[in-house]
Amino acid sequence: MQIRTPVTEITVAAPRERILLALLLLREGQLVPVQQVISALWDTNPPPTARAQVHSCVSRLRQLLRRTGLPEELVITEPSGYRIKVGADELDSVLFATRIERGRAAAADGELATARDEMRAALALWRGRPLADVDSDAVRASAAHLEEQWTAALSLCLDLELRLGAAEEILAEVADLVERYPHHEQFRGHLMTALARTGRRADALAVFRRGRAMLAEELGIEPGAELVELHRRILNGDVALLLAPVEPLDAPRRAARCLPRDIADFAGRADAFAGIVAALSDERHAVLAIDGMAGTGKTTLAVRAAHAVSPRFPDGQLYLDLRGHSDRAPLDPGEALGALLRQLGVPPERVPAVSDERAVLWRTELADRRVLVLLDNALDSAQVLPLLPGTAHTGVLITSRRRLGGLDGAQPVSLDVLPLDEAVELLQRTVGARAAADPACTVEVVELCGRLPLAVRLAGARLQHRPSWTIADLARRLRGVDRRLPELAVDGRTVAAAFALSFQQLPVHLQQFFALLGLHPAGDFEPDVAAAMARLSVADAEELLEELVDVHLVEAPAAGRYRLHDLLRDYAAQLATDGDAVVDRLLDHYLHSVAGANTFLELADDTPPQAARAFSGVAEARRWMERELPNVLSAARLASDLGRHWQICLMTRAVSPFLFGFGYGEAQLELYERAIAAARTLPSPELEAEARNYLAGVYFRMGRMSDALSTLRLVTAIAEREGIPRLKGTALTNMAMLHSRLGQYADAIAAAEAAATLHMDEAPAHLQFKINSTIGIAHTQAGNYDQALLANRRGLAAARRLGGMRAVGIMMGELGLNHLHLHHLTVATALLRRALELKRRSVNQFGAAETLSKLGTAHRLLGRLADALSCQRAARSLMEQVADVSGQCLTANDLAITLRALDLDDEARQLNEEALAKSVRIGDRYEQARALAGLGRHDQAVSLFEELGVCDLSALYR
């Protein structure tokens, strides 16, 4: 292998660099995955350091390119592999193909001499067997088509020279070719013709006899019809053959036109269609493998693209259903080759009985033809590999429900469901005016069909055959999950039947695994829950999920995440056995995992069950909760829908601390209503009171203070009636926090102290912490800083008994605020910084925002205005994420004071106006007074502070 430039010529001596360069050039412009490079370099036994060695090999190749004066950027590194990009006139294989095409075109125009010259110029580029010096089975296999191109080009060139009367000149060359390629009938025919024309008829007949005997002995077949006819003409002394130039041995053949009908109402897939057409229109025609789940329109797209490029393949367009997913058995490669050869017009008596020999004949027949082959419904790579031609001027389109990763060099085209606009367009083209008349219901129908092309078509066909139906009638019929698949059926063609063909190909254990996945609610999930449902290890579950991804029964939207298409989920759920037990395991997985995450996040002090998902730390627990929250909530609703009253109550109780602590509760009011209804049905007053207590917390975050207060009073009443002091203490403490937020400090302190005096065998440490922290907050806002310090110190002691960071961080933040109000700025700053660190580490988002804002206040009082501004802008942004309305008022008012100190009055005024509107709406009179003070309405602010009983008026401006 050599690299030539105008100034130098270098032989690529290093074996690995030769292999790498050859592999890249064979797929010029295409990505070569790292794994394929490794396979080419080491075949079946790569070393553990293979990837690192590939990287080094690429570096050395780039250095070699640089020494020849070529830019090393020719070799491009991609995330998953490498590719090389060279010009069309810089690669000898490309120059060869270009010359051959010119020669063919000249021959077609009758310019035989020009055609012969082009073919000889192309053949002169050859220096021997392609890549003979490259020691790699994978590379040599990929290069096999180059030699087949050479033999086809040489055969055509010799034919041209015979037609030009050059029999004598080519005789020695053709005799040598027959010795080297004894099975090549065209070379043997050329030799017979040349001998006959030079007066050596006996030798020509002897060449035929030797060839016939060899074919019978080695392959058990007779020579082809064309060679037999040539023998007859020589034997009979055909004057036209012996004295005049003849037509090629290949008489004009009628091109096969086997493609199925293209549909008129095709819609969507514009990008995929354009990419396929472009690839098949390239001079080096591609092998493209279209994969996707059942019903995505793979065949429809392939047929349409094949029709679009058919003029570029004048020698035929072949089509074969490989029956990979069918009611009939899949075609084995030998059967498929026989069918394809018959489509090409090969007589049955010439088709060998042995599959390998059929493959040789198939490649030989295609060697000098421009043919498009559409292999539909392939089972796997093993079925397709023997059917691939050896020449680059044959285009191949493959469709399969399986990802065909074993086809080296094939370009994958993976189809997902249609984008919404394309799905709507498909339905509109199918049903016409009725879809256009009701756009909203049209969108609903295609979404209920999961935007799956087959489902959309069947829905449209249902509507076409029901003239009295409107699109709204169809939408109504599709809404019921149990009715959706039965509705998507027309004349025996159903979505469920399409799915069944994929399902039936699975081994039994994979069928069972797929079926139970249908019981998981909609959305993507991690392998852990699948493992729990199937009672497998996570590794085993992930392996099965990947197998289902390969056959497009499961999707993998991201690494380690899986999901089922809505219709596939419906189908799988119908197949599931032992569904109650599987659902129990699903619900237990999420319940126990949430309990484990809560413990890490210090949102609950219960010990998580052993079945809980393991977490390595706070950050992982937080990420898991945020990622899996949709699944947890869906599982809770599933429990409710199935009448699992205990489970919906327990799951709501488990997830509520996270919903409250991270600002997700506002959108989940329905969850609490379901849990309350379930608790009343059981009946379980304790679970009902717990659900109502968490609902009150959501109202509190939303600023619905009156709803929160009435709900807490109901919780208190239930706890008193049922004799549950723990719940009553919790409700009274929450009520104290609510009174404090409303500026009712005396009521707040009274409620907290009432909680402290409840008779319990042992007051939980978290309740002692909460009581003291609530009393401290009330005294702080009232301006009673010394009393607040005492309460907060008691709260800190209780927090330390609890252990962990969360409670300690909260109490340090309250103590820091006390010292801030007392102008102990150095102490306050130290406490607030420590509190901020603990709150961040314990992922207390609300607490971090509040403390960050007050740390900004400390900076401002110390004259560090830039630091103050940075802290308080960040605090405001963080509080917006938490969706705590009162906290938003606090951060807006704090930031406004700092902005005024920087003479940014307009922005400060906007923030105070925002805080005023929100605080009035939710009844937070403390922040209302601060907003009024910021807007210059001092008298109103002071009056409001006095009504609240706040004894430190300077807090209005702090």
Image: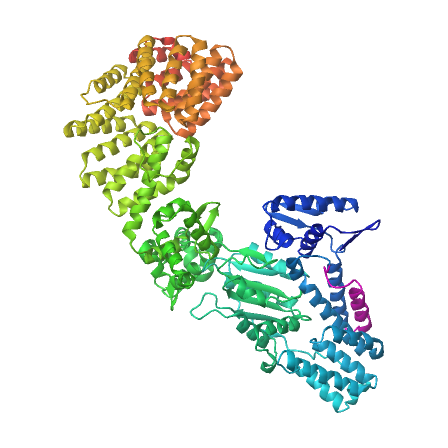
How many labels were placed on the picture?
0
131 inside magenta stretch: yes
- 355 or 735, nearer to the observer: 355
Residue 872 percent location from the top left of the image: 47, 20
Residue at image coords 50%, 70%:
331
- 885 or 573, nearer to the observer: 573
Residue 33 visible in the snapshot? yes
Look at the image and name its color scheme.
Answer: rainbow
For the N terminus, the image quarter is: bottom right
Q: Residue furthest left?
A: 721
Residue 908 percent location from the top left of the image: 47, 19
Residue 595 percent location from the top left of the image: 33, 35
Looking at the rendering, the stretch of residues picked out in magenta corresponds to 109-132
Residue at image coords 37%, 27%:
884
- 77 or 316, nearer to the observer: 77
Q: Is residue 67 above or below residue 737?
A: below
For the C terminus, the image quarter is: top left
737 inside magenta stretch: no
- Residue 184 relative to residue 957: left or right: right
Residue 902 visible in the snapshot? no
- Residue 698 relative to residue 839: left or right: left
Rendered image quadrant of residue 748: top left
Rendered image quadrant of residue 106: bottom right
Residue 824 percent location from the top left of the image: 42, 8
